[in-house]
């Protein structure tokens, strides 16, 4: 058996059994060989592309696969929807990777399920390429994320605003549990299912809580809050805008999931938003911490009946955990920002130093990634230091003074190099790569982009063209949810 599926042991209330709907003409488009190695799949799978295309389109199932669509609910843009569920995805099962970790294998775009509502159950090639590339880019930057093993074109047309080539993406995640999974059973007032789900989540992601008795549910909340704080801080570090932080897209594992309308911030501005449907800027770059906290409040509500039999006491315990979000976030965020400018032992006054830098970047409409890269390089380049000191004025000399108090410039530079990517999946480049790949039916542009993005902290001979940007590069740029 290649796969087993422990989710099915939870019982029929948690999912619907449904096979993927076969596709006409599956062809391997993108393959993640490093991930396949990690999953110990390379030696099990047939080596030819056409067999792999059959398997990862859903036309042929891996031994042990038990395809299911998971039930979940979710708050979408603040509004509760009691039933969402996998409308175009099939969880096939899980396997143990080379490091001993369980990884779930899910097909996305593999046909309709009982949760499809009016959707066609399919995925278009362009968004599938974007999900593949974005996941790999974040992973390479050291950010927790689901990843993609394969993109298979289906030979079928998927209709959105325009006709598109269809694709099936294989998603790999430590689990597909979301806040919305808990909300589904909370709305049904099914305490027993909530407890089962919580224990499943604890077993999978927080096994150390298994010995905590009745206290384990409050601790689960605490742990998930901590992971979400860490995740959002990581997004802020690199300028990632998720774009659709609904509770059904908020994992219990703390991995980034669902790369629909996501984008990267170019010019620094906390109100940056690219998603065409996010008119109020709910999911703007700088709003992400507040939204993560809001999502954690929704999670806390689902756990109340498990946290304490007495509702008042349950609310008190959960509120205390939620209130800790703010301090925890501030602490992690300030430490991260300090490290971005080469300071390991952050002092209270460093908050002012980093926030003044951000204000300066915003005022001067400077690119976030490029600016931190230039600051990093300036520590060993007198020319660049002079340039930056002209551009950033007093701030630059204050920073230099702070650094010489902290440590040698070279040491600071090393830290900054680990914190500040040289290259990110810039919006315009992403669009270009997707355009070329879909039009030519050939993944080489995507493969080249991936090669560069997989080395975000080290300059290679291929990096430079992908670093270029202009202040108006993102002018009018929009991303779309209907993928
Ligand atoms: P998302 O915005 O991608 O997180 O999806 C929200 C919900 O819509 C989930 O329940 C998805 O399964 C469902 N969904 C999105 N696109 C489709 C589609 N093409 N067909 C069926 N269901 C879909
Ligand atoms: Mg989703």
Image: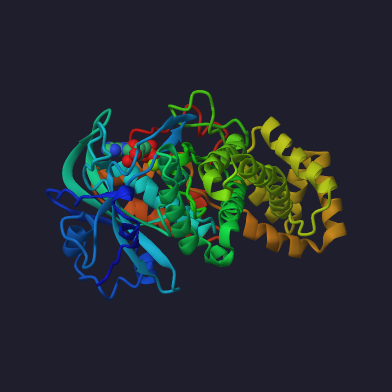
Counting every numbered tag in the picture gives 0
Q: Quadrant of the N terminus?
A: bottom left
Q: Is residue 135 left or right of residue 240?
A: left
Q: State left or right for residue 398 relative to residue 73.
A: right
In this orientation, does residue 267 appear?
no
Q: Ligand 1 appears in which quadrant?
A: top left
Q: Nearer the viewer, residue 193 or 358?
A: 193
Q: Which quadrant of the structure image shows residue 267?
A: top right
Residue with the most extreme top position: 279
Q: Residue at x 71, y 39 (%)?
A: 358
Q: Could you tell me which quadrant the C terminus lies in?
A: top left
Residue 95 vs residue 109, the one in the foreground: 95
Q: Could you tell me residue 43's position as x and y percent?
A: 28, 76
Measuring 61% from the left and 52% from the top, which residue is drawn there?
222
Can you say whether 181 is above or below 8 in the image? above
Q: Nearer the viewer, residue 159 or 122?
A: 122
Percent of width and height locating residue 451: 42, 59
Q: Does residue 213 appear left or right of residue 56 in this picture?
A: right
In the rendered image, the residue lying farthest to the front is 310
> Which quarter of the figure has residue 294?
top right
Residue 479: give x, y in percent of width and height: 42, 33
Residue 56 rendering spot, x and y as whole percentages:
23, 58
**Is 251 positioned to the left or the right of 354 in the image?**
left
Residue 242 to residue 177: above or below: above
Give me the residue at 76% from left, 59% from top: 344
């Amino acid at each position: 058996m290649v796969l087993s599926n422990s989710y099915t042991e939870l019982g029929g209330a948690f999912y619907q059994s449904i096979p993927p709907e076969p596709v006409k003409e599956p062809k391997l488009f993108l393959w993640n060989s490093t991930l396949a190695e990690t999953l110990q799949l390379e030696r099990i799978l047939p080596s030819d592309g056409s067999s792999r295309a059959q398997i990862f389109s859903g036309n042929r199932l891996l031994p042990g696969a038990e395809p299911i669509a998971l039930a979940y609910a979710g708050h979408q843009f603040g509004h509760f929807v009691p039933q969402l569920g996998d409308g175009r995805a099939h969880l096939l099962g899980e396997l143990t990777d080379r490091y001993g970790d369980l990884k779930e294998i899910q097909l996305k775009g593999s046909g309709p399920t009982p949760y499809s509502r009016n959707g066609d159950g399919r995925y278009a090639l362009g968004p599938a390429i974007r999900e593949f590339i974005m996941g790999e880019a974040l992973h390479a930057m050291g950010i927790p994320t689901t990843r993609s093993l394969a993109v298979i074109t289906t030979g079928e047309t998927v209709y959105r605003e325009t006709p598109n080539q269809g694709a099936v993406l294989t998603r790999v995640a430590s689990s597909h549990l979301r806040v919305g999974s808990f909300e589904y059973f909370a709305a049904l007032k099914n305490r027993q299912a909530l407890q089962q789900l919580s224990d499943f989540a604890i077993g999978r992601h927080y096994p150390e809580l298994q010995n905590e008795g009745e206290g384990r549910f409050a601790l689960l909340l605490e742990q998930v809050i901590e992971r979400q704080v860490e995740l959002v801080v990581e997004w802020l570090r690199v300028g990632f805008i998720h774009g659709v932080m609904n509770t059904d897209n908020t994992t219990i594992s703390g991995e980034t999931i669902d790369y629909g309308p996501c984008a990267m911030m170019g010019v620094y501005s906390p109100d940056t938003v690219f998603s065409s449907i996010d008119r109020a800027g709910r999911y703007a770059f700088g709003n992400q911490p507040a939204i993560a906290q809001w999502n954690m409040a929704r999670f806390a509500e689902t756990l109340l009946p498990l946290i304490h039999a007495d509702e008042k006491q349950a609310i008190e315990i959960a509120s205390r955990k939620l209130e800790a979000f703010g301090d925890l976030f501030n602490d992690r965020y300030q430490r991260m920002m300090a490290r971005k400018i080469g300071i390991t032992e952050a002092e209270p006054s460093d908050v002012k130093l980093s926030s003044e830098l951000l204000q300066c970047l915003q005022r001067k409409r400077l690119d976030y990634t490029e600016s931190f890269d230039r600051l990093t390089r300036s520590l060993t380049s007198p020319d660049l230091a002079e340039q930056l000191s002209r551009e950033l004025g007093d701030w630059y000399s204050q920073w230099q003074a702070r650094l010489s108090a902290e440590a040698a410039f070279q040491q600071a530079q090393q830290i900054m190099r680990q914190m500040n990517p040289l290259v990110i999946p810039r919006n315009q480049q992403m669009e270009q790569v997707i355009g070329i790949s879909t039009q030519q039916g050939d993944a080489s542009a995507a493969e080249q982009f991936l090669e560069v993005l997989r080395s975000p902290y080290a300059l290679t001979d291929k990096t430079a063209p992908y670093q270029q940007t202009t202040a108006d590069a993102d002018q009018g740029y929009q991303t779309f949810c209907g993928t």
